[in-house]
Image (tube, rainbow, N blue to C red):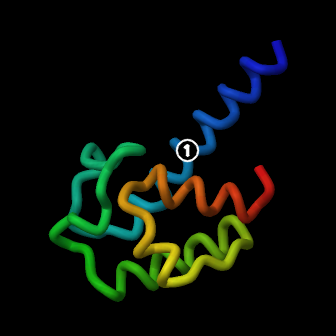
Amino acid sequence: MIINKCIKDEIMEIKDFIDKVAEQFDDVDNDVFEANTKFRKLDEWDSLTSLLIISMIDEQYEVVVSGDDIVKSETIQDLFNIVSSKTGR
């Protein structure tokens, strides 16, 4: 079914997005990262990590997110939703 394929594609996309966000954190175990992870609460979070995530989104998804978008995002899912809305998905 088309609906199931869309849901499966979205699940694959969020997993890919989570992996890409996790790559920006050098000293955090990848097992910590899930859609509901509050990434700004992690010990390694700082302004450099914020810039790395903004840059990764620009390079990988060709979407410009602002510092305000990062601040509005409590979880990785929130950030994914912002990126998705800007890509028209």
Q: Residues within 10 Å of mark 1 (few under 14, many from 20)?
A: some
Q: Quadrant of residue 73?
A: bottom left
Q: What amino acid is labelled 1 in the image? A: Ile
Q: Report whether 67 appears left or right of 28.
A: right
Q: Report whether 63 appears left or right of 50.
A: right
Q: Quadrant of residue 36?
A: top left
Q: Residue at x 65, y 76 (%)?
A: 58
Q: Quadrant of residue 88?
A: bottom right
Residue at numbered disc 1: 14
Element carrying mark 1? helix
Q: Is residue 4 above or below residue 35?
A: above
Residue 26 is situated, as x and y percent measured from the top left of the image, at 28, 69
Q: Residue at x 21, y 73 (%)?
A: 44
Query: Which residue is more in the foreground, 21 or 88?
Result: 88
Q: How many marks?
A: 1
Residue 30 is situated, as x and y percent measured from the top left of the image, at 30, 50
Q: Residue at x 38, y 55 (%)?
A: 75
Q: Is residue 59 above or below residue 88?
A: below
Residue 37 is situated, as x and y percent measured from the top left of the image, at 31, 50
Question: Where, quadrant-wise, is the N terminus in this rendering?
Answer: top right
Q: Is residue 3 above or below residue 28?
A: above
Q: Is residue 69 above or below residue 15?
A: below
Q: Residue at x 72, y 65 (%)?
A: 86
